[in-house]
Image (spheres, helix red, strand yellow):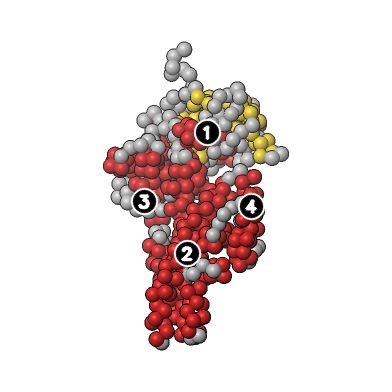
C-alpha cells in the first residue's frame, strides 16, 4: 500500500458519553495527508467533542483514533491502557489545535506564546525558537505585534497568534475548533484568510466551523454531523447535492442558504 | 533601661531562633502546601479527599493544641523529637494547611483553557504547571501568602511555651531576672513589628512586580 494512501488520521467506531448522555455514537472518518476536512452540524451534534478527542483533551469509551498509524491516547487500540504523561504529551505535539476562545497565555508576549512549545517540547534554543516565532507571526501578518501581550491585541490578532503558536510546532494535522465564533464579524475574514493560505500550502486540517461558505470553498471534504453520528459526507458540491435526500442536512443548510451562500 | 541594654545580646540570640524557626516553617509549609494544593486541584479523587481531610483537621485545631499534640504525642509513637523541632513541625502543619487553600484558590482562578492550550502544544503536566499555571497563579497566591508569612513569625512566639528560647522566651527570661516587664515587652513588640512591617512592604513591592497584565 502506498504510504500516501494510508490516512493520516483514522477514527473508527468512536463512542463517548458524558454521564447518561451519548455524545458520540460511533464515528468513523479519515483525513488524508494534505486534506482539508470541515465538520459542520447543529450545535450539540458532537463536533467539538470529536475534535477534542483527536488530541485527547477528551477521553472516550470505545473506538480508536490513530494519527499516522499510532493510537493517540492509549498504548494500543486493543487493551486501551492510557499512555503515560510524557508519552501522551509527545503524541499531542503531533497535532496542533486552535481554540474558539484563543487560550493564549496571557503572561507571555505573542512571540513567547509561540516559543514555549518550541523550547520546551521541540527542545529548540531560545534564539532558534525566536526566529521561528518571528517567521510565523510575520506570516499571519503580526510582524508589528511580536512583543505585545495578548491583552494588547484585538480578538482577530489574538487568534492569529493562536494559529501561529499551533503551526510553528509543525504538527502533522491542525485542528481548528470554531476559531471565528468568538470574533466580531469584521475580524472574521483576517483569520479565515490566514487559514486559507495554510490550506493552499498543503497543511492537513480538520476543522469544526459554522462558516459554511468558507467550509465549502476551502475544504476538500465536508462531514455533516447530527446527533453524534456522521449523517453525510463528501466533497462540498456532492454534500450540498445530498441535501435533497437528507432531511436533517437540508434543514441545517437551509438556515445558511438564504443569508450566506451567494 | 540599663537592664534592656544588658539583655540585648541574649535577646539577639532569641531573635535568631525566632527567625530560624519562621524561615524553616515558611519554606517547609510552602513546599508541602503547594504540592498538596496541586493534588487538591488536579489529583485523583482519593488524593483530593486525603488533602481535604488533612486541611480541614489541621485548620479545626487551635495552633496551641497542635503544638502540644506534636510535642507530647510524638514520643509515644516512637518518634524522638525535641521541643524546637516539635514546634517547627506543628507550625509547619498549621501553615501548610493555609498554603493549600491559597494555592487551591490561585490555581482554580486560572481558566481551564490554559491547561488545555498547554496540553495541545505537547507540554507535560509538570511543564504546564511550571510555564503556564504557576506564573499566572502567583499573582493571586502572593498577597495572602505573604500575609501568612507574618502570621508565621508571630505564631512562632508560641513555641516559647515548649521552653524553646526564641525572642519571646528570651524576653520572658530577662523579665524573670530584672522585673522590668514593660520596657522589655515593648522592645519585643517593636522587634516583631519591624520584621513584619518589612515583610508587608516586600509583599507590596512583589505584588506590583507581578502585575504583568496591563488592563
**Disc 4 and disc 1: Cα gap in Å?**
38 Å
Could you tell me if the residues under marks 4 and 3 are in contact, i.e. CB atoms within 8 Å? no
Q: How many marks?
A: 4
**Residue under numbered circle 4:** B77
Q: Position of residue B1 (x, y in %)?
A: 41, 87
Residue A140 shows up from this direction: no
Could you tell me if the residues under marks 1 and 2 are in contact, i.e. CB atoms within 8 Å? no
Q: Is residue A35 above or below residue A123?
A: above
* Quadrant of the rendered image containing residue A124: top left
Query: Residue at horizontal 38%, vertical 82%?
Result: B5
Q: Residue furthest top?
A: A1
Q: Is residue A248 above or below residue B9?
A: above
Q: Residue furthest right?
A: A20
**Disc 1 and disc 2: Cα gap in Å?**
39 Å
Residue A144 shows up from this direction: yes
**Residue under numbered circle 1:** A84
Q: Is residue A44 left or right of residue A216?
A: right
Residue A188 disc label? none
Between residues B27 and A204, which one lies in front from this camera angle? B27
Q: Residues within 10 Å of mark 4 (few under 14, many from 20)?
A: few
Upstream in the sequence, badge 4 or badge 2? 2
Which chain letter goes with mark 1?
A
Could you confirm whether marks 1 and 3 are on the same chain?
Answer: yes
Residue B22 disc label? 2
Query: Residue at horizontal 42%, vertical 70%?
Result: B13
Could you confirm whether marks 1 and 2 are on the same chain?
Answer: no
**Residue under numbered circle 3:** A109
Q: Nearer the viewer, mark 1 or mark 3?
A: 1
Amino acid at each position: 500500500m502506498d504510504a500516501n494512501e494510508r490516512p493520516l488520521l483514522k477514527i473508527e467506531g468512536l463512542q463517548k458519553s458524558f454521564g447518561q448522555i451519548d455524545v458520540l455514537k460511533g464515528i468513523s472518518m479519515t483525513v488524508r495527508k494534505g486534506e482539508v476536512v470541515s465538520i459542520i452540524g447543529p450545535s450539540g451534534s458532537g463536533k467539538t467533542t470529536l475534535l477534542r478527542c483527536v488530541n485527547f483533551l477528551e477521553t472516550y469509551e470505545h473506538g480508536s483514533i490513530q494519527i499516522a498509524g499510532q493510537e493517540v491516547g492509549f498504548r494500543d487500540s486493543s487493551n486501551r491502557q492510557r499512555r503515560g504523561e510524557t508519552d501522551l504529551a509527545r503524541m499531542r505535539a503531533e497535532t496542533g489545535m486552535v481554540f474558539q476562545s484563543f487560550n493564549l497565555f496571557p503572561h507571555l508576549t505573542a512571540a513567547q506564546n509561540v516559543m514555549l512549545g518550541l523550547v520546551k517540547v521541540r527542545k529548540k534554543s531560545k534564539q532558534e525558537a525566536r526566529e521561528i516565532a518571528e517567521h510565523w507571526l510575520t506570516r499571519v501578518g503580526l510582524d508589528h505585534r511580536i512583543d505585545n501581550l495578548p491583552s494588547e491585541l484585538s480578538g482577530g490578532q489574538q487568534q492569529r497568534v493562536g494559529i501561529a503558536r499551533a503551526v510553528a510546532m509543525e504538527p502533522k494535522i491542525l485542528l481548528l475548533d470554531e476559531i471565528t465564533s468568538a470574533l466580531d464579524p469584521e475580524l472574521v475574514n483576517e483569520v479565515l484568510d490566514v487559514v486559507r493560505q495554510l490550506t493552499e500550502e498543503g497543511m492537513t486540517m480538520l476543522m469544526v466551523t459554522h462558516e459554511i461558505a468558507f467550509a465549502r470553498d476551502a475544504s476538500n471534504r465536508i462531514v455533516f454531523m447530527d446527533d453524534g453520528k456522521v449523517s453525510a459526507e463528501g466533497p462540498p458540491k456532492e454534500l450540498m447535492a445530498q441535501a435533497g435526500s437528507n432531511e436533517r442536512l437540508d434543514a441545517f443548510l437551509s438556515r445558511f442558504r438564504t443569508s450566506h451562500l451567494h | 533601661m540599663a537592664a534592656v541594654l544588658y539583655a540585648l545580646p541574649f535577646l539577639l540570640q532569641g531573635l535568631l531562633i525566632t527567625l530560624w524557626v519562621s524561615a524553616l516553617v515558611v519554606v517547609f509549609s510552602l513546599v508541602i502546601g503547594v504540592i498538596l494544593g496541586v493534588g487538591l486541584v488536579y489529583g485523583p479523587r482519593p488524593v483530593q479527599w486525603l488533602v481535604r481531610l488533612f486541611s480541614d483537621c489541621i485548620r479545626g485545631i487551635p495552633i496551641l493544641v497542635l503544638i502540644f499534640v506534636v510535642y507530647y504525642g510524638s514520643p509515644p509513637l516512637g518518634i524522638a523529637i525535641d521541643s524546637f523541632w516539635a514546634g517547627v513541625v506543628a507550625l509547619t502543619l498549621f501553615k501548610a494547611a493555609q498554603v493549600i487553600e491559597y494555592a487551591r484558590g490561585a490555581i482554580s482562578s486560572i481558566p481551564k483553557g490554559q491547561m488545555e492550550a498547554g496540553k495541545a502544544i505537547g507540554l507535560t503536566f509538570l511543564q504546564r504547571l511550571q510555564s503556564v499555571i504557576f506564573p499566572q497563579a502567583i499573582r493571586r497566591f502572593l498577597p495572602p501568602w505573604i500575609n501568612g508569612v507574618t502570621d508565621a513569625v508571630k505564631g512562632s512566639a508560641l513555641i516559647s511555651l515548649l521552653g524553646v528560647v526564641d525572642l519571646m522566651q528570651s524576653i520572658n527570661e530577662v523579665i524573670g531576672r530584672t522585673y522590668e516587664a514593660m520596657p522589655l515587652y515593648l522592645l519585643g513588640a517593636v522587634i516583631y513589628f519591624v520584621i513584619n512591617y518589612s515583610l508587608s512592604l516586600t509583599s507590596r513591592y512583589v505584588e506590583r512586580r507581578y502585575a504583568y497584565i496591563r488592563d
